Amino acid sequence: MPEVLKAPLVVEFPFTRSLGPVQSAFLTGLRERTVLGVKTTDGKVMVPPVEYDPVTADELRHLVEVEPTGTVTTWAWNPEPRRGQPLDAPFAWVLVKLDGADTGLLHALDAPGPDAVTTGMRVRVRWATERTGAITDIACFEPCEGAASDTEPAAHDGQFDDAVSGIVAEARLDYVYSPGRAQTAYINALADRRTVGERCPSCRKVYVPPRGACPTCGVATTDRVEVGPAGTVTTFCIVNVKAKNLDIELPYVYAHIALDGADLALHGRIAGIPYDQVRMGLRVEPVWTEGGRYPDHYRPTGEPDADYDTYKELV
């Protein structure tokens, strides 16, 4: 049996959001080496602060300043830091209840090893050298000595000069994707300039790309069927917005194409014809580039258009 394909993939994007008065005060406070929390309806202090009471849903605006020292309530050792994490060397993820707060703040603890970390240990904020108004203004926590303070948190008006009004969070997900048995066979066949689907043993429909099971009958599909290479445009759209890293002249056409012998339309780019001449029923065939592992685009075959009744179930 051929080896199932797998490949590392990365999904990343910048997430931009505006800040309300509570979050703005919290992040701006970090820039000024001040940790703010918010009092809930029942008098508890939440750090980080939230804008609405998690129990009553009341709007919360009563800000207070808590201490930069606190107590570890729980922790987990991270032996292999990943890209973008607070520290490059192994560290502990900790929940810290800052003095004056009633909830835990999640951050990194700089410690020489897991034997140096305990629940109940005292820690303090290590501030970043350069601070911009972000959670990373707390570089990490570090161990310290001393008992917890029982001083009541002081009220704070949340006012700072040049307050932070928005943030950009870089979201990134690294993972390994495997298309599975059915699509591995499909991809390997494309490399040989063949399009292979799978037929359902119950309803006899041929799915391209194959999914390993019939979405209608719910049974496994193992009977492989070569389809195409020609097909019919069932529907299409004209693209007028340039995509990043895609060097294609605008406008261009992206279409659903029902390959001959298939019962599911796949999508592909249409070229070799003016964009305003692409139409439903247009007969097309794949065009491969030198060394390409999949069709670069589809072009008209020159055949008469297909009758609508032959592809209406695939629109």
Image: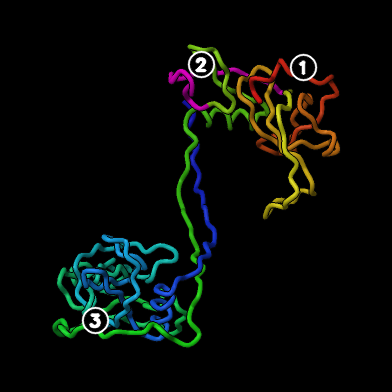
Mark toward the start of the polypeptide (1 vs 2): 2
Indicate whether residue 220 is drawn in magenta: yes
Q: Amino acid at mark 2?
A: Cys
Secondary structure state at the residue bearing disc 3:
strand
Q: Which residues are magenta?
A: 211-229
Instruction: From the image, tell me which residue sits under label 2.
Output: 200
Instruction: From the image, tell me which residue sits under label 3.
Output: 69
Instruction: From the image, tell me which residue sits under label 1.
Output: 307
Cα separation, mark 1 vs mark 3, equals 75 Å
Secondary structure state at the residue bearing disc 2:
loop
Mark toward the start of the polypeptide (2 vs 3): 3
Q: Is residue 296 visible?
A: no
Q: Judge from the rendering whether residue 163 lies leftward or rightward of residue 299; answer left or right.
A: left
Write the residue at 32% across / 67% down. 90
Q: Nearer the viewer, mark 1 or mark 2?
A: 1
Q: Judge from the rendering whether residue 180 lies leftward or rightward of residue 294; answer left or right.
A: left
> Around disc 2, counting alpha carbons within 10 Å, would you say few (fewer than 14), some (14 to 19), or many (20 or more)?
many
The x and y percentages for residue 39 are: 27, 74
Secondary structure state at the residue bearing disc 1:
loop
The x and y percentages for residue 252 are: 77, 43
Q: Quick check: marks 1 and 3 in contact, CB under 8 Å? A: no
Q: Amino acid at mark 3?
A: Thr
